[in-house]
Amino acid sequence: MTSLKMKVTYLSLVLLGALCLYFIISKLTSSKEKPYVFKKGDGKFLQLPEINCKQNPPFLVLLVASAQDQVLARSVIRNTWGRERLVRGKRINTLFLLGAGPKKHIAGEVSQEGHLHRDIIQKDFVDTYYNLTLKTLMGMEWVHRFCPQAAFVMKTDTDMFVNVYYLTDLLLQKNRAAQFFTGFLKMNEFPIRKKYNKWFVSKFEYPWDKYPPFCSGTGYVFSSDIARLVYNVSESVPFLKLEDVFVGLCLARLGVRPQPLHTEQTFFPEGLSFSPCRFRKVVACHFVRPQDLLSYWHALERSLGDACPGA
């Protein structure tokens, strides 16, 4: 009996030692990993939109980050705030940012959709949430290479309501047409170190204790020169999967500080209950489903000629 206990104890110690050795080796190995560095020109364009910025430069280009399977959301946006239009005589174009996927039938459908609407920008990186930074940089690259003539650019998402009428009015009031960046300002944010959090960032990825000023990735607006500046500086900035923070790091490197668009809040990343009068003074609102977007947009457009209480 004593001999059996000794054998069990011995085997337990050996197993414990082996586990300790495994964790030590894996920690040493991970510490030698090199951080991912974005390289300009990485990947090839699979689709480009049909838009001639030289002959007919848009005042505002809306870049909408989208997943391959969000067909309904893209369709509704094309029929609401993303429809090509003139606002105050200024042309507005909406384009969708997509990556690639392993499913051939979906890839084929996305290709057909792009040929039909001519409004998709797509590269061959894997289309996942954690590649949102690559998707955003793809949009910046497209503006820099193909549409620097645009006055302003907005990056946003498919679950957003964007009031292009009010946004255009506010941008027309701006005197600055260079090194301008605005959105829902996040001036005092810290890395989340809890491993199972969606926005977890390790000290290896980002060793500092505070983020530089940035704007919520749900929707931010910038002068088109920012696309060139961010794209060119991106190689020298520590790569992060959190796209809005990464853009903030690029802005900090460039010495560009995000600024408010208006004295009142106009970007709502946490959502907002809808009313036509309230949404007249909203630039962007998060957590809007496609079916709600359609009804909200029609209600807003029907109300534009009406007076609002207290207005």
Image (cartoon, rainbow, N blue to C red):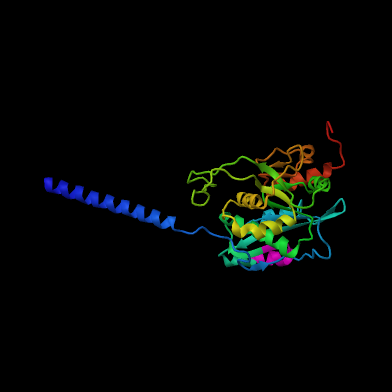
In the image, 103 versus 125, the foreground residue is 125
Magenta-highlighted stretch: main secondary structure?
helix
The reply to whether residue 7 is in sight is yes
The reply to whether residue 106 is in sight is no
Residue 135 falls in image quadrant:
bottom right
Range of magenta residues: 109-121
* Residue with the most extreme top position: 310
Q: Is residue 290 magenta?
A: no
Q: Quadrant of the C terminus?
A: top right
In the image, 195 versus 204, the foreground residue is 204
* Residue displayed at 75% across by 41% down: 282
Q: Position of residue 210 (x, y in %)?
A: 57, 43
Residue 55 falls in image quadrant:
bottom right
Q: Position of residue 62 (x, y in %)?
A: 74, 54
Circle count: 0
Q: Position of residue 93 (x, y in %)?
A: 78, 57
**Above or below: residue 279 compared with residue 106:** above
Residue 38 falls in image quadrant:
bottom right
* Residue displayed at 75% across by 44% down: 283
**Above or below: residue 33 compared with residue 256:** below
State left or right for residue 29 relative to residue 209.
Answer: left
Q: Quadrant of the N terminus?
A: top left
Q: Position of residue 165 (x, y in %)?
A: 81, 47
**Above or below: residue 310 compared with residue 60:** above
**Above or below: residue 42 compared with residue 81:** below
State left or right for residue 236 relative to residue 282.
Answer: left
Q: Is residue 119 magenta?
A: yes
